Image: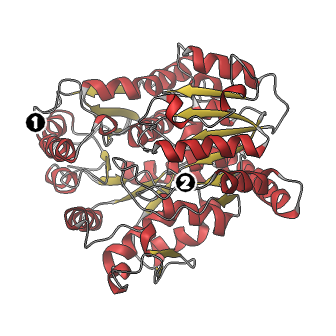
Amino acid sequence: MATIDEQQPLHILFLPFLVPGHLIPIADMAALFAARGVRCTILTTPVNAAVVRPAVERANEDALRGDAGGILVPMDIAVVPFPDVGLPPGVENGAALTSEDDVRRFFHAIRRLREPFDRFMAEHRPDAVVSDGFFTWSADAAAAHGVPRLVFLGTSVFARLCNEIMVRHNPVGACPDDDPDAVVSLPGHPHRVELRRSQMADPKKLPIHWAFFQTMSAAYERSYGEVFNSFHELEPECVEHHRAALGRRAWLVGPVALASKDVAARGAAELSPDVDGCLRWLDTKPDGSVVYVSFGTMSSFSPAETRELARGLDLSGMNFAWVISGADEPEPEWTPEGFAELIPPRGDRGRTIRGWAPQVLVLNHPAVGVFVTHCGWNSTLEAVSAGVPMVTWPRYSDQFYNERHVVEVLGVGVGVGARDFGSNLESHHRVIGGEVIAGAIRRVTGDGEEGEAIRRKAAELAAKARAAPEKGGSSYDDVGRLMDELMARRTFR
């Protein structure tokens, strides 16, 4: 067997799942490693390459400017064709799927990506693979090439433990089928975690999904370890439990959204008129006076829900910047009376953005005082890093776990009382009244003890989040430890 040149930089292949919430953090994570002298390649398809390219270009620009400590190891993207599985041309991302049939075809394509993955591994022989947990086949594929597989799922250690408990013990199965409000406890979690049955995935209703989760868990067992977009100070008890009780190796390398030294660089090169106007409008507002509202790229809201959200923003009395998606009816169908008077051209209390918004840039604006969020982990961690308290409104996936983490453990948010676990294709959730939404916003932003405590804790966590990736910080050290381990494996292969 040939000896690997010890002087060559480590080479890590990153294989992100094809949805924005997984693509973007894995690209930012690659940028962190590239800044430490690791050669990083992201393997993806043409449409998804466009999603990660801005992060790659920023990292390479940082290196050229010397922001990477004088190390110049450019990141690159290996683009492979999206498998022909009967989806329309250009539909290569989970955010573009509109039916369960599309979802099935999409996951068939995910399985067929093993062939170009194997080809890349044989030709380039990277030192490690950071693979999204949804690519269950990558555990055996990487092992076949003698390459360690590191798993990334884009969630917190807290939620990862919740998922593991669900797969191992299925506590939902012990609840009566006709009681959606039955309280379900997750045994063995380092924190007390209790949810309503209606807030959790039901194995009886989702047998195919459940089987896939079990396959994912088994693939975790066969992997070298896990990397998390988190940091030790955010969830120390969970990290210890993950390592001691589960016997899993973990490296916490986040918040990866801080990979770019320039927060403003995370905005698009060309801003839409909505976004440009909103950013200019934020500059005119007092510190902490704006509610930022966004539910990510894949959440669906019914017109009735959207209407009540609009009412809640009005009743809150605060300024607002609202990224609107998922309202299936024309705007007049969900716009409550008087709302048009709040936004241009008639009013100046709020701004609406259709489509994409530069969330990190918005959250870090001093005018933003609270974030109404679906509790996707990327959004949650971006808010933590910016020191912005949250009003939590989970919809599906790990979001109800993240809400428990934010509200009950970290103490940096207030929930609106969401009870219904759905999917990104569903918009049939219980409608939450505008008065409830406004009340949650006031609890976070008010002058009472609760609001002051939430804001104080948010500021304290933000300082810890920003220190973690810096030299001497916990995430910086974890990146270094992982690099040392991978280099130590470079003897003979």
Judged left or right of residue 345, residue 67 is left
Amino acid type indicated by mark 2: Ser
Tell me the residue at 38%/53% (across/down). Answer: 153
Residue at mark 1 to residue at mark 2: CA–CA distance? 35 Å
Tell me the residue at 21%/68% (across/down). Answer: 207
Judged left or right of residue 450, residue 422 is left
Q: Is residue 216 above or below residue 185?
A: above
Q: Are marks 1 and 2 in contact (CB under 8 Å)?
A: no
Q: Position of residue 87 (x, y in %)?
A: 15, 32
**Which quadrant of the figure has residue 2?**
top left
Tell me the residue at 28%/50% (across/down). Answer: 491
Mark 1, Cα crowd under 10 Å, few <14 / some 14-19 / many 20+, is some
Q: Earlier in the sequence, mark 1 or mark 2?
A: 1
Q: Nearer the viewer, residue 411 or 178?
A: 178
Q: Which residue is mark 1?
A: 85
Q: Secondary structure at mark 2?
A: loop
Q: Position of residue 333 (x, y in %)?
A: 50, 34
Amino acid type indicated by mark 1: Val
**Which quadrant of the figure has residue 222?**
bottom left
Q: Is residue 422 above or below residue 43?
A: below
Q: Which residue is mark 2?
A: 230
Q: How many marks?
A: 2
Q: Secondary structure at mark 1?
A: loop
Nearer the observer: mark 1 or 2; the answer is: 1
Judged left or right of residue 458, residue 408 is left
Tell me the number on the disc at residue 208. Answer: none
Q: Position of residue 474 (x, y in %)?
A: 61, 54
- Asked if residue 323 can be seen in this view, the reply is yes
Q: Nearer the viewer, residue 280 or 81?
A: 280
